[in-house]
Image: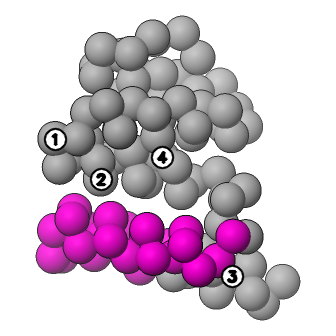
Amino acid sequence: MAASKCECGSARVAVSMADSICPAAALAQIDELEAHDKRLAGYRYLPAAKADLLRREGRDQEAARAYQAALALAENDAERAFLAGRLAALGGPADP
């Protein structure tokens, strides 16, 4: 499980970059992680983080697709409601 902690830690570093540098830099880091570590495909918070970064960059269609991917991986009603609200704000369907 050490690799799991490492990969998720790398994703958290990328997301924290958005606050300290810019969303575009964090998106580039996430794209790099996705390209080189396929284990992240099932990490349920990655598409939500990516969606938020895309939204912040004004890339609404891509953000909507990422929010839909995040909804598919959400494991509880609170996550689904939050993600559905974000998706609705972008003009997508609001139903979780």
Q: Residue tagged by mark 2?
A: 53
Check disc 1: other Cα within 10 Å, few if <14, some if 14-19, many if 20+: few
Q: Quarter of the image holding residue 38?
A: bottom right
* Along the line of sight, the residue nearer the viewer: 21 or 27: 27
Q: Residue 30 colored magenta? A: yes
Horizontal side of residue 9 vs 37, given as left or right: left
Magenta-highlighted residues: 11-38
Residue hosting label 3: 5
Precedes in sequence: disc 1 or disc 4: 4
What residue sits 64% from the left and 51% below the top? 44
Which badge, 2 or 3, comes first in the chain's sequence? 3
Circles 3 and 1 in contact, beta carbons < 8 Å: no
Mark identifier at residue 48: 4
SS for dot 1: loop
The kind of residue on which mark 3 rests is Lys
Q: Quadrant of the N terminus?
A: bottom right
Q: Amino acid at mark 1?
A: Gly
